[in-house]
Amino acid sequence: MSKNKVSSQIYEAEMLARKILEVEPKNLDALKGLGLVKLKQHLYDDAINLFKEAFELNPKDKEIKIKLICALELQAKKTAFTSQLPKSIELIRYALTIEPSSSALLCRMSLLLSVSKNFIEASEFADRALSIDKKSSEAFNMIGLALLGLQRFPEAEKKLLKSISLNPDAALAYSNLSLVYRAQGEYDKALETIKRAAALDNKNPQILNNLGVLHLDCNNLEDAERSFRKSLDNLSEFSEAHYNLGRVLLMAEKFTEGWEHSEWRWSCSEFPFSPRYTNITEWTGQNLKGKKILVWGEQGIGDEIMFASLIPELNKICDKLLIECDSRLKPIFQRSFDNILVIDRNDLSGALVKRLGPDYQISMGSLCKFLRKNTHDFETTRVRYLQENPELKREIQNRYSKLGPEPKIGISWTSGNQIIGPERSAPLKLWGKVLSLRKCHFINLQYGNISDEISSVSRLFGVKIHQDEMIEPRKNAENWFAQIASLDHVISIDNSTIQVSGSLGVPTWTLLSRKPEWRFGLNRSDHLWHSSVRVYRQKELNNWDPVINEVARDLSHSLK
């Protein structure tokens, strides 16, 4: 039967049902018939409303019950990986009130709760599913996924392997198993496992997204891009695949398209921030002559510092610029930029913004799609775009001058990022060849409780690492900036330290993991965002020795 004929029949069925409902609004057959039409048209919300009305009229009708649950599941599946995830959860909760003993629905709820990071509740629903069907491959799969989220990796692996033993074609179980291996740094094993999942189901958007992530881990940008695009071919509103594709494109320096996909970050469950000031018109490139615009910070303090490099350019094209930022950065931004008003982010900032009445608003990260469209655009960044407090700088320089006339070199070796921090970090005990160099003084820039680590390494290598107890970056950025501005050089892994030193134009060497953030590109030894930063890249994941050796050699030459 031709598509046109089928469409014609569906249209006729819809018209007939609507005519009946005009006369008899509670006609059960008409409600059911129109609901079936909406299912065929993939208008699941409409189908839900119609089947729900029919079900309330006759809750004993098994066909209506089945179709209502079907519509609820289809709509929940459609929105599960978008900004409407909470709606998906509520749809399945409602379905479970109709069929509370459905193992399939309990597994679906467990999946959605895991996606929303409610891993304990997800595990509870999966356990309920398993109590109903003790040989359910899907229930074991969902328990494994929840345990993965709880970072109970050996238990997660065991449950997922059980799922696969019950169903050797369980593609999603293989996919989740690959994530367990990835979380433990077993990337080759993870890639092999996710490829098995993709061979079993080459159209599942989750599997294709996970395949792309593993390719990205291995810096296979072309394969990663291909996987993310294929994922989106199968689910066009899959937020995570969009965001991941954006990361790949930005790393490949395909900035225009990369920024567009990056905008999907707001809908990702992995992205721990939400849009603000949505009641104010978002700036999308309109002429700002005579206009007032609010730019608000997002992500961590390091990201706010990096994105602040765009402020001078925006300031030139608007009448008045308002910046909302981390309270620690307020005095620094106010000092560094002319003709701007800086607002520290707190519970009262919304009311203040309302009084100031900006015409437009935009997040700092989203500015990039207008001001950083290609590599040439980065050339407009000032070498030094932030200014430290000069009095504090002089005070710190006076303190450090007592160490001697030799160069003062700041060092930082640990990332506080809970997810990728361990891979970024280069433990201080590995820095022996650097720390053993003479004709310089090493200044600790590492925040956190690291006194014992410094004492241990100092004894190990017979070196002195100066700790300035008056500096606490997590509480006071003014002292932090002044300290780094007073140094001759900074050597650090990828953390917020390099954003501070880069923004101040201090010569900086960055020790970069084999799995870099998009902002470093794939092969660059320079840094587009900070011209004073030089990059030393790992060739092999977790092997810092060649990087440390190269840094030690170059530092030795510079000290001669």
Image (cartoon, helix red, strand yellow):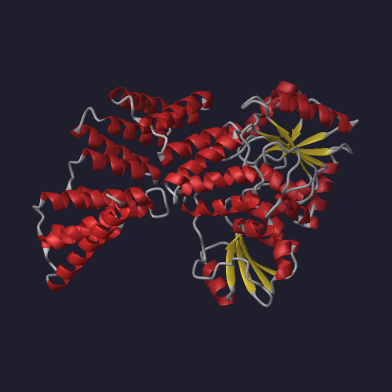
- Between 213 and 445, the residue placed more toward the observer is 213
Foreground residue among 13 and 206: 13
Residue at 30%, 49% (x, y): give it: 74
From the viewer's perspective, tell me whether residue 357 is left or right of residue 386: left
x and y, in percent, of residue 339 in the image: 73, 70
Which of these two is toward me, 513 or 199?
A: 199
Vertical placement of residue 67 versus 156, above or below: below
The picture places residue 56, in percent across and down from the top left corner, at: 13, 60
Q: Which residue is pictured at 87% across the width and 37% down the height?
A: 404
Residue 498 visible in the snapshot: yes
Task: Tell me the residue at 87%/36% (across/down).
Answer: 406
State which quarter of the image contains the C terminus: top right
Q: Residue furthest right?
A: 560
Position of residue 129 in the picture relative to residue 367 (left or right): left
The x, y position of residue 423, in whole percent, is 59, 32
**Residue 475 higher or lower than 280, as above or below:** above
